[in-house]
Image (cartoon, rainbow, N blue to C red):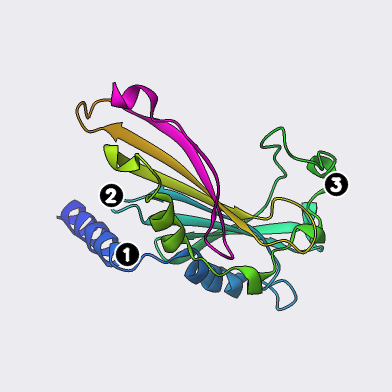
């Protein structure tokens, strides 16, 4: 009986969250509650993971600049609409275009803080725009992962990077990552399309 009650509680909670999963902007508003007033608007990076069947993100990790913390940053995780954890954010070297490799050792810089007034395109719109790119309708998109950040220091707008996973419509057993699309979070313009459908269309 106890097991049945526990399962029912989990299912009801899951259904409740599924109907009200926050966008990135809404997740930031939730995460701000964990931050001091001085850091609430100093967003460095937003990452969305674990999308559902409707490609809505279930887990957001918002990294705030906070010079009182190790690496000058604190990450708040918002899962299914609830802030569930905070952690000191480690600096990770992601790709060969990173111009400030030294920050892997010295921590985040306030030069990386996003000007939130230039963030016009929310995550749901970013996904919608990405899915309109040529040929993506020829496959079934099964998962999205999003990252919002600035590509360089200074007064530049943030950029959405939308990573996509897809499966073949003719052979559903073939499922793979197909690359990413970069969009301006200020204008919605597609800046770069690095999707490769490859064998999914064979």
Q: Earlier in the sequence, mark 2 or mark 3?
A: 2
Residue labelled with disc 1:
17
Q: State which quarter of the image contains the C terminus.
A: top left
Please say if the residues under marks 2 and 3 sit with CB atoms less than 8 Å apart. no
Residue labelled with disc 2:
53
Q: Earlier in the sequence, mark 1 or mark 2?
A: 1
Residue labelled with disc 3:
106
| Number of marks present in the image shown | 3
* Residue 48 visible: yes
Q: Nearer the viewer, residue 35 or 111?
A: 111
Badge 1 element: helix
For the point 85% across and 40% down, the residue is 102
Q: State which quarter of the image contains the N terminus.
A: bottom left
Residue 127 in percent (x, y) is at 42, 55
Q: Nearer the viewer, residue 169 or 68?
A: 169
Residue 164 in percent (x, y) is at 42, 41
Q: Is 187 a magenta residue?
A: yes
């Amino acid at each position: 009986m106890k097991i049945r009650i526990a399962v029912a509680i989990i299912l009801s909670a899951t259904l409740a969250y599924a109907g009200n999963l926050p966008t990135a902007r809404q997740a930031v508003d939730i995460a701000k509650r964990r931050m001091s007033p001085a850091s609430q608007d100093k967003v460095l990076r937003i990452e969305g993971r674990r999308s559902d069947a409707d490609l809505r993100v279930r887990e957001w990790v918002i990294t705030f600049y906070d010079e009182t913390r190790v690496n000058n940053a604190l990450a708040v995780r918002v899962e299914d609409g609830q802030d569930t954890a905070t952690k000191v954010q480690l600096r990770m070297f992601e790709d060969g275009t990173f111009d400030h490799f030294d920050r892997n050792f010295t921590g985040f810089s306030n030069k990386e803080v996003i000007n939130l007034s230039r963030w016009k395109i929310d995550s749901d719109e970013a996904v919608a725009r990405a899915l309109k790119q040529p040929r993506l309708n020829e496959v079934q998109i099964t998962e999205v992962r999003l990252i919002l950040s600035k590509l360089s220091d200074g007064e530049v707008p943030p950029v959405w990077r939308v990573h996509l996973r897809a499966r073949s419509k003719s052979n559903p057993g073939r499922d793979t990552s197909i690359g990413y699309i970069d969009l301006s979070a200020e204008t919605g313009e597609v800046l770069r399309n690095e999707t490769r459908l490859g064998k999914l269309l064979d």
